[in-house]
Amino acid sequence: MATPIRVLVALDADADRDTVEAVIPVVPGIELTAVADDLETGWRELEHTGVDAVLVSCAGRAEQALAFIEGVASEFPDRAVLLLHSGGANGLFRRALAAGAEDLVALPVANGEPPSPAERERVSAELHGALEKAVARRKRVTAGPGLAHGRMIAVVGPKGGAGKTLVATSLAVCLADAGERVVLVDLDLQFGDAGLVLGLPPSKTIYDLVVSGGSLDEEKVDDYLTTHESGVRVLQAPARPDQAAAVEVDFLRQLFKLLRASADWLVIDGSPGFTPEVIAAIDAASDICLVGTVDAAALKNTKLGLETLRLMGVDPARIKLVLNRADSRIGVTPEDVHAVTGHPPDVLIPSHRDVARSSSDGRPIVSSHAGSDAARALRALSRSYMGVEGPAGIGQSLRRVFRRAG
Ligand SMILES: Nc1ncnc2c1ncn2[C@@H]1O[C@H](COP(=O)(O)OP(=O)(O)OP(=O)(O)O)[C@@H](O)[C@H]1O
Ligand SMILES: [Mg+2]
């Protein structure tokens, strides 16, 4: 049986001990180690007892309790803190989170009477769920930066049809093939086709997640991800363009944070241009993958795209420039690209007649034609993110693409 979650209760001066004790879940997974009648005693207990979670309870004014939570968050970052409150919670949730609490649970309103058994049961079940999630989240956060904070690659590009979806889906599949935990979010909210390209059934989408309401947590988001055979978990784009407006930028910011905490890699397939959702992704991302093509008009747009990223304050070291449909017969060399855009290309992907076919079949080119130059270039891109192949290696693969295509 799993080790139970050890819980300490610390009561603020005006908290009601009986009400709090009545909702502590009496289940094998929870072990109540102590109930401290004031915050000072609670602090001493914390210093001497190894607990996983602290329940801080207050009624009315919450200043002392919030200061206590702040103290626990800074001195004992491996303990999950939850606030139990009775009375008006106006703005309290936000303040408790800002202080470092994982969650807030409202106690049954006493009104001089003991709460009904049904009400006690309901709050107790809510507290049980909140405790399990909070302790799991704390464990992940303190387990180390690799686990707590995956990298996020925003695949973007100024123009439609350049190959963003090809790059984003291939990158996600290659990273998953290498054993990484990958989530792909189709952020082309009106006309996203990442699910289609990967041959996924059109099931739940980001729109369904938005309209499901309630607070966003890892378990909930998980229900809306569709798993590809490679292991990539995909949050698909809305089924219809009119549903795109329901997906707001604030929601996306929260979503990105959550997904980065639960995966090694979060890959974003962007819509064309710098739409508000793409800007939100760029802001949240650790890495930007700018996809363009190599004809003269496209290079001009790529240059503008790079300038826009610079104006947004993105460090050029975080940007990889990928040029798609890059064949030598177009007459543009990597040096030309560098000269025009001010950024050397990191990877060139040649045209391959089976790319469109493999998308229609729902089998990405990296799997269906693994030995092709296009697949090789896409794998080199994923390796460069994982740090397996440095810039020199990429340079070699660039030159090989040009030589072979020539
Ligand atoms: N290297 C390539 N060789 C051959 N066909 C390609 C290549 N790259 C992309 N394509 C084809 O070009 C089309 C556009 O590619 P893709 O959907 O990846 O672009 P996109 O930038 O995501 O487009 P949008 O902006 O519309 O989302 C697709 O039909 C795809 O199969
Ligand atoms: Mg696309």
Image: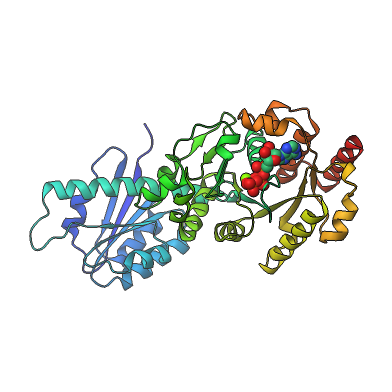
Question: Residue 13 sits in which quadrant?
Answer: bottom left
**Left or right placement of residue 142 versus residue 395 in this view:** left
Residue ID at (74%, 63%): 304
Identify which residue, 163 or 394, lies in the foreground: 163
Identify which residue, 336 or 264, lies in the foreground: 336
**Eyeballing the image, is 181 above or below 10?**
above
**Eyeballing the image, is 228 above or below 298?**
above
* Colouring scheme, one of rainbow, by chain, secondary structure, one colour: rainbow
Quadrant into which the N terminus falls: top left
**Left or right placement of residue 51 versus residue 280 in this view:** left
Number of marks in picture: 0
Where is residue 169 drawn, in percent x and y? 63, 39
Residue farthest to the left? Answer: 113
**Left or right placement of residue 130 versus residue 160 in this view:** left
Where is residue 194 drawn, in percent x and y? 58, 40
Quadrant into which the C terminus falls: top right
**Eyeballing the image, is 383 above or below 86?**
above
Residue ID at (23%, 48%): 124
Residue 375 visible at all:
yes
Looking at the rendering, the quadrant in which ligand 1 lies is: top right
Where is residue 163 drawn, in percent x and y? 69, 44
Where is residue 334 drawn, in percent x and y? 87, 50
**Left or right placement of residue 24 versus residue 266 in this view:** left
Residue 32 visible at all:
no
**Eyeballing the image, is 395 above or below 288?**
above
Identify which residue, 296 or 60, lies in the foreground: 296
